[in-house]
Image: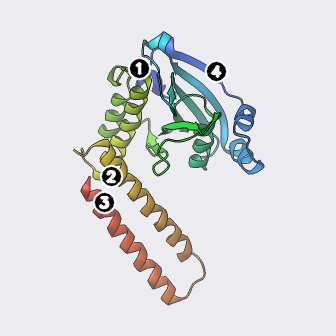
Amino acid sequence: MKMNIYEELLNYPNECLDNRKIHKTLIYEAGDLKTRDKNIIQKNIEQITWKYAFRQDNTNIPGFTDDTKEYLEVEIVEILLRTAKKLDRIADIIFRTMPHPSLLFFKYENKVNIYAAHVKIHGSDYSLFTYADEENKMIKTGWINLEKTNEYEQMLFNELKLENLDNANFYKFYDNMYNAIINYKSTILKNGISTLTSNEKKKILQEVNNIEEKIKELQAQIKKDINFNELIELNTLVNEYAQQKQELINKL
């Protein structure tokens, strides 16, 4: 029997349960998706569900609005996967099309990968959204095995419980969720608790992510048919980037 993460680990109340299926066609239309993205959604997703809706009427948390942000409620969206592929692209599509700030729970077999992102209204078009921080965009936990959670994962779930989130308004409420994932990622990398601020951690995590992307690109080149000298040069670059990554982790 699979664990119910929302009830067993997060203690989300039934009064906030929504449990409505989101048809893929709604995502296609809201995002005005091209054929390539429609295929990504169709091939990799089994089902999308609006699991929980935290609103003022069921939490007593007030909304927050300013010139670019509208945090009137917070959603928990569950994405059941057919394959554990293209998560970043799927998350990007959903974040840009959902009408409220959302915490995305990608589920595959007995694992979960949680995504968060602060979004803002895209210019004068109130039907489109973009990232509040284009440099950092999304933050994600990476895969967590729900059948065997460690102390850091348990700390994450504890931070995401309603009673431990700031209830001053829904912006601060969601920002606590976002920062909980930043704290978790930092803890995993450091293998210990970091004393830096969330913004300091976020900056380091982004730099680490950029380096990891460069390493992936180099490793893809190494797999190609290249000569010995090119192989030596690329491996040297990989090692240099790996060292830079470790130096950043040491700063956490």
Which sits earlier in the primary sequence, circle 4 or circle 3?
4
Kindly indicate whether the residue at mark 4 contacts the one at mark 2 (C-beta within 8 angstroms). Answer: no
Kindly indicate whether the residue at mark 3 contacts the one at mark 1 (C-beta within 8 angstroms). Answer: no
Circle 3 crowding by C-alpha within 10 Å: few under 14, some 14–19, many from 20: some
On the rendered structure, is 192 left or right of 42?
A: left
Residue with the mark numbered 4: 20
Q: Please give the name of the residue rendered at 41% of the width and 54% of the height, measured from the top-left corner.
A: 206
- In this rendering, the answer to whether 217 lies above or below 46 is below
Which sits earlier in the primary sequence, circle 2 or circle 4?
4
Residue nearer the viewer, 50 or 102: 102
Residue 234: x and y in percent read 47, 79
Q: Please give the name of the residue rendered at 60% of the width and 20% of the height, measured from the top-left corner.
A: 19
Which sits earlier in the primary sequence, circle 3 or circle 2?
2
Kindly indicate whether the residue at mark 2 contacts the one at mark 3 (C-beta within 8 angstroms). Answer: no
Residue nearer the viewer, 9 or 21: 21
Scheme of colours in the image: rainbow
Residue with the mark numbered 2: 189
Cα distance between the residues tagged 3 and 2:
10 Å
Please tell me in which quadrant of the rendered image residue 237 appears: bottom left
**Dot 2: element:** helix
On the rendered structure, is 112 left or right of 91?
A: left
Q: Please give the name of the residue rendered at 31% of the width and 63% of the height, measured from the top-left corner.
A: 246
Circle 4 crowding by C-alpha within 10 Å: few under 14, some 14–19, many from 20: few
Circle 2 crowding by C-alpha within 10 Å: few under 14, some 14–19, many from 20: some
**Dot 4: element:** strand
Cα distance between the residues tagged 2 and 1:
27 Å
Which sits earlier in the primary sequence, circle 1 or circle 3?
1
- In this rendering, the answer to whether 252 lies above or below 214 is above
Residue type for callout 1: Asn
